[in-house]
Image (cartoon, rainbow, N blue to C red):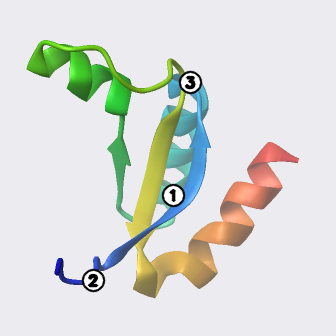
Amino acid sequence: MFPESEYERVYTGSLINIQFLQNLLQDSGINSITRDDMKSGMAAGFGGGIPDHIQLFVKKTDIEEAIPIIEKSLS
């Protein structure tokens, strides 16, 4: 059994949107990480994932602050 992650997915979208959101979050002092299954699969030597389907994660302790920033910026 894997331990529970301290991160939670808050958005999935294109690289441009992810980078935009990461900058906004960083300006508010919220660190984030991304997961790109397509890029990871290609680096490992096999295809996998969906293009422009990158996931953005923030720490669970930052969720309440991050979600309004994301929602406001994408509306």
Mark seen at residue 4: 2
Q: Is residue 26 visible?
A: no
> Looking at the image, is mark 2 or mark 1 earlier in the sequence?
2
Do labels 3 and 2 touch, CB within 8 Å? no
The answer to whether 26 appears left or right of 4 in the picture is right
Alpha-carbon distance for marks 2 and 1? 23 Å
Helix, strand or loop for disc 2: loop
Q: What's the amino acid at mark 2? A: Glu
Q: What's the amino acid at mark 3? A: Ile
Q: Which residue is mark 3?
A: 16
**Disc nearest the viewer among 1 and 3:** 3
At which x and y percent is residue 15? 50, 25
Q: Residues within 10 Å of mark 2 (few under 14, many from 20)?
A: few
Q: Which residue is mark 1?
A: 25
Q: What's the amino acid at mark 1? A: Leu
Residue 29 vs 36, above or below: the answer is below
